[in-house]
Amino acid sequence: MDKEKNQNENTQNEITLKFKIIDILYIVMMIAPIVIAITLKVLFTPGGDGVNITGPLIYVRIPFALQDIIITEAQINSWLILITIFGVCLYMTHGLSENPTLKRQHFAEMIVEKAEALINDNMGDYYMSFTPFIMAIMAISAFSSLMSLFGLFPPTSDMNVVAGWSILVFGIITYYKLKCGPLNYMKEFTKPVAVLTPINIISEFATPVSMAFRHYGNVLSGIVVSVLVGSALQGLSRMLLGWAGGFIGSIPLLQVGIPAILSVYFDVFSGLLQAFIFAMLTMLYVSGAFDLDAFMEYKRKKQEKKNKKLKIKQTNLEEN
């Protein structure tokens, strides 16, 4: 009896140890990409003084026939963010059970419930399968903007990255518009009157452009304002204490606290807000592009035509 008890305890200890080791690996998976991004930033950033507002650093340039393939800081940071998010998901879902005992499972279930409620309220039951996609967009956008807290280049301030997201969303919008048939899609451009067809076509392609520029502009402007204010505060500090010279003259008095407050707004609040807005626009554009009643009517007519053809074919076979 004692032997069995000892064996069960040893097995339980082994399971607990294995669980903790896997947890540690997932935590490393979350943190390592940020450390790698900071290391690359330090290694590739050229030296210089004063205000320096530039685009993403170029890490690799591969010569190509038509145009060089450039691997930038924005691309690398985007992939590193994906790894971090993947690590967060694995950590949050590790050790799931029917009777949850871990706090992280309660938190994960709460996120899923809130996400499903958000999709249901803004898109409807038909679009519940969009939940992972919408949450993925929101998470990638939020994590990308928050990278500036570590002094890294946020991918959301690169037009190429945000434009890629917008083109993907535009493709999904067009796909759902075409579900009611190409003819119905073309007719939509003539509403409410045919005279407005050119304007409707322009507005169709303006959707991804407006989404991209809105997200990109808000994030980039926050970074520029933060850098300029920080530089101005540095100059004011030198004016106030520069006369003292030595150690006192080098104290960045006005740079303590104020930049942190700006960072809370521009890097945290504004970044999270833009992620939410981009996700909301995606939900509204996709759900607004698809008339469920018109789609059901289109399917019914299509099925009637199919049944009619089958009936004619059957009749011909019977006559022969």
Image: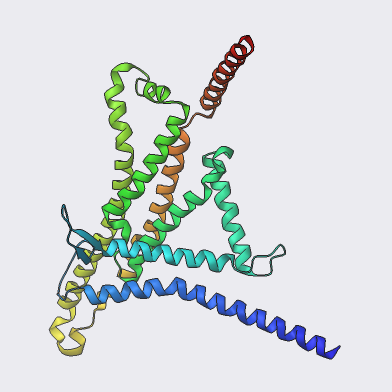
Q: Is residue 285 above or below residue 308?
A: below
Where in the figure is residue 181, as x and y percent of width and height? Answer: 44, 26
Q: Residue furthest top?
A: 319
Identity of the residue drawn at 71% across and 82% down:
11
Q: Is residue 102 above or below residue 130?
A: below
- Inspect this view and state whether residue 264 appears: no
Q: Which quadrant of the view contains residue 6?
A: bottom right
- The reply, left or right, for residue 35 in relation to residue 221 is right
Where in the figure is residue 49, as x and y percent of width and height? Answer: 14, 75
Q: How many marks?
A: 0
Name the image quarter holding the N terminus: bottom right
Identity of the residue drawn at 45% across and 34% down:
176
- Inspect this view and state whether residue 67 appears: yes
Q: How is the image coloured?
A: rainbow
Where in the figure is residue 246, as x and y percent of width and height? Answer: 16, 89
Name the image quarter holding the C terminus: top right
Q: Which quadrant of the view contains residue 48?
A: bottom left
Which residue occupies the foreground of this view, 242 or 148? 148
Q: Residue furthest front?
A: 320
Where in the figure is residue 297, as x and y percent of width and height? Answer: 55, 22
Which residue occupies the foreground of this view, 71 or 214? 71
